Image: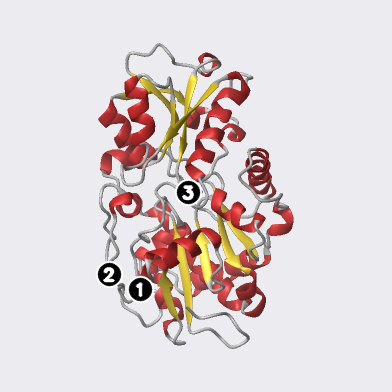
């Protein structure tokens, strides 16, 4: 893996989680490799390396040439431990956050959650974002009733690797060990149907976005400070590709649905159930004061719950200049290439690969040989981060 020095690097890296991301769309369209191919810079996914190395970099962001678009829990965790990353973009994607109960339960409103047994998973992984998601998901649901986590009974549910996401919590719900489970995303829609669980609280319906703050809301794009300091033009160009992919998405709903299915590993039923409101701003990348405030609220929650090694000053972490330059570049390209489809504007490169494919449960993924530009999600990227 090439370190970032004053010389122009010969490779850049990206990683994203199996959720809707501009990075995933750009990779599917073959735009990332094409952007830098003429200069001999290879753009690679962490999937191209061994699983143990990839897992470390995906969570720690210790690889200087890496762009990461994924859950904010690992991103904030890495920054809190001193990793020299910069926040260069945020998205906010509603992806079916819900509190599930058994079909025979009478629980149907946030006001009924206080006093109940709530499933809090525990995973033996570097940073347990699953646990963080459940805690903040329940905190958000309880807040709708003017209550908090202290008003409920938190039941720890050990989750073994390889059994599939949400399976441990939903199995505990089926046995009657807990009264409610927090879930999110496309695979959660399918898991709920398999277990016969029903929605008691639809967090997506909450009018106050603060009730929906969690690992993916907002979702950060981060880059290592070394790359940004020494090669700001490369960062701006990489981000410009993501901006173009995000702007392309609203006009291509069928193609986006296909990409989301490939990215999440879910079928049409799960994608349709999880991503009901894919509007023109769904994947829009920004660093608005509103989104920064929402991320700062997430940071405070994570710090108070003991997930961070120290506090993170979110406004100071953010650098809006790369995104400003990226938007200028994307706008100029759009004018110059008016009427030319985005995937045909890739400079001198054919589209690589096709739709990514994933097994039903990401825990079951096995390493495989890398492609010239890996379009599949890394085997180590935990589901629904």
User: For this view, does 52 lie left or right of residue 317?
Assistant: left
| Gap between marks 1 and 2 measured at Cα | 8 Å
Which residue has dot 2 on it? Answer: 353
Seen at 41% across and 50% down, the residue is: 19
Q: In front of the other: label 3 or label 1? A: 1
* Residue 329 in view (yes/no): yes
Q: Could you tell me which secondary element the residue under label 3 belongs to?
A: loop
Secondary element at tag 2: loop
First of labels 3, 2 by sequence position: 3
- Within 10 Å of disc 3 (Cα), the crowding (few <14, some 14-19, many 20+) is few
- Residue 132 position within the rendered picture, expressed as x and y whole percent measured from the top left: 54, 40
> Which residue lies at the image location 53% right of the left edge and 44% below the top edge?
215
Q: Nearer the viewer, residue 338 or 79?
A: 79
Q: Counting residues from the N terminus, which is met first, the one under dot 3 or under dot 1?
A: 3
Query: Residue 317's quadrant in the figure?
Result: bottom right
Question: Can you tell which of label 3 and label 2 is closer to the viewer?
Answer: 2
Check contact, mark 1 vs mark 2: CB within 8 A: yes
In the image, residue 172 sits, relative to residue 310, either above or below, namely above
Asked if the residue under mark 2 is in contact with the one under mark 3, i.e. CB atoms within 8 Å, the reply is no
Which circle's residue, 1 or 2, is located before the other in the chain? 2
Q: Which residue corresponds to mark 3?
A: 280
**Horizontal and vertical percent for residue 112?**
51, 14
Question: Relative to 339, does residue 280 appear above or below in the rendering?
Answer: above
Which residue is under mark 1?
A: 373
């Amino acid at each position: 893996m090439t370190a970032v020095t004053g010389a122009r690097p010969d490779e850049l890296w990206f990683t994203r989680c199996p959720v809707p991301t501009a990075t995933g769309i750009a990779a599917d369209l073959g735009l990332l490799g094409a952007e830098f191919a003429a200069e001999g810079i290879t753009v690679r996914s962490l999937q191209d390396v061994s699983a143990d190395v990839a897992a470390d970099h995906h969570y720690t962001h210790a690889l200087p040439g890496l762009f990461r678009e994924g859950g904010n829990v690992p991103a904030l965790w890495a920054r809190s431990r001193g990793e020299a990353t910069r926040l260069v973009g945020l998205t906010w994607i509603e992806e079916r956050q819900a509190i599930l109960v058994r079909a025979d339960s009478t629980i149907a409103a946030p006001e009924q959650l206080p006093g109940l047994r709530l499933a809090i998973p525990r995973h033996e992984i570097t940073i347990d974002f699953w646990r963080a998601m459940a805690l903040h998901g329940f905190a958000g649901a309880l807040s709708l009733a003017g209550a908090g986590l202290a008003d409920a009974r938190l039941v720890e549910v050990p989750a073994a690797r390889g059994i599939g996401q949400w399976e441990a919590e939903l199995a505990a719900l089926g046995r009657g060990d807990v009264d409610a489970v927090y879930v999110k995303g496309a695979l959660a829609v399918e898991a709920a149907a398999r277990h016969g669980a029903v929605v008691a609280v639809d967090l997506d319906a909450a009018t106050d976005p603060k009730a929906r703050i969690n690992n993916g809301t907002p979702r950060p794009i981060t880059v290592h400070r070394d790359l940004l300091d020494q090669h700001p033009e490369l960062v701006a160009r990489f981000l410009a590709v993501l901006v173009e992919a995000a702007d392309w998405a609203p006009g291509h709903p069928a193609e986006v649905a296909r990409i989301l299915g490939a990215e999440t590993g879910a079928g049409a039923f799960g994608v349709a159930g999880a991503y009901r409101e894919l509007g023109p701003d769904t994947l829009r990348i920004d660093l608005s004061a509103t989104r920064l405030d929402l991320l700062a609220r997430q940071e405070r929650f994570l710090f108070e719950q003991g997930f961070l090694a120290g506090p993170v000053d979110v406004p100071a972490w953010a650098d809006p200049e790369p995104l400003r330059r990226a938007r200028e570049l994307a706008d100029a390209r759009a004018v110059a290439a008016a009427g030319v489809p985005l995937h045909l504007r890739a400079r001198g490169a054919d589209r690589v690969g096709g739709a990514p494919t994933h097994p039903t449960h990401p825990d079951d993924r096995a390493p495989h040989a890398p492609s010239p530009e890996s379009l599949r999600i890394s085997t180590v990227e935990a589901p629904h981060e």
